[in-house]
Structure formats: C-alpha cells, structure tokens
C-alpha cells in the first residue's frame, strides 16, 4: 500500500480522513490511490476495524 502508513491506527485515521474529505466511497479511494481494497480492508480488520458503506468510514 504505497502512500499509506503501516501503523494500523494511523492508517485508520488517514483513511477515514480521506474518505470524509475527498472520496464518496472506499472503491473511489482505492481506484484513485491504486490501493488494493482487499489488502486495505484486511489490514484494518486485523486491527479490529470494518468498513461501513452507509457511513463511508471504518469503525
């Protein structure tokens, strides 16, 4: 995952900020940043976070 932090808590914060401020969906973020959605969701899931599509954020 280029351009994104390795630390899960910082990654969580960064992704939620980008979703809130710049992207209407996780798919849009992943497409624009060339990030593998499966890897991203897996890494955040390992830290206890899951994506909520209706809220467009991880929690």
Image: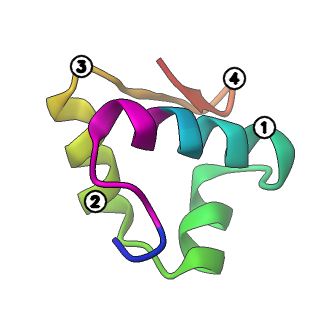
Q: Residue at x 28, y 59 (%)?
A: 38
First of labels 1, 4 by sequence position: 1
Crowd around label 4: few <14 · some 14–19 · many ≥20 (10 Å): few
Query: Where in the figure is residue 46, as x and y percent of width and height?
Result: 15, 32
Q: Is residue 9 left or right of residue 51?
A: left
For this rendering, which residue is in front, 47 or 55?
Answer: 47
Which residue in the structure is indicated by mark 4? 55
Q: Residue at x 78, y 37 (%)?
A: 20
Q: Quadrant of residue 52?
A: top right
| Whether label 2 touches label 1, CB < 8 Å | no
First of labels 4, 2 by sequence position: 2
Instruction: For marks 2 and 1, give the one nearer the viewer.
Output: 1
Instruction: For marks 1 and 4, give the one nearer the viewer.
Output: 1
First of labels 3, 4 by sequence position: 3
Which residue in the structure is indicated by mark 3? 48
Q: Which mark is residue 20?
A: 1
For this rendering, which residue is in front, 42 or 10?
Answer: 10
Instruction: For marks 3 and 4, give the one nearer the viewer.
Output: 3
Depicted 35 relative to depicted 49: above or below: below
Q: Which mark is residue 38?
A: 2
First of labels 3, 1 by sequence position: 1
The magenta segment: 4-12
| Whether label 3 touches label 4, CB < 8 Å | no
Query: Where in the figure is residue 8, as x and y percent of width and height?
Result: 29, 37
Quarter of the image that includes the N terminus: bottom left
The kind of secondary structure element at disc 1 is helix
Q: Residue at x 42, y 43 (%)?
A: 11
The kind of secondary structure element at disc 2 is helix
Crowd around label 1: few <14 · some 14–19 · many ≥20 (10 Å): some
| Whether label 3 touches label 1, CB < 8 Å | no
Depicted 45 relative to depicted 25: above or below: above
First of labels 2, 3 by sequence position: 2
């Amino acid at each position: 995952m280029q351009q994104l932090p390795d630390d899960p808590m910082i990654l969580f914060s960064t992704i939620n900020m980008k979703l809130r401020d710049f992207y209407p969906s996780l798919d849009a973020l992943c497409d624009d940043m060339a990030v593998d959605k499966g890897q991203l969701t897996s890494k955040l899931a390992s830290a206890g976070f899951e994506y909520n599509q209706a809220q467009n954020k991880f929690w």
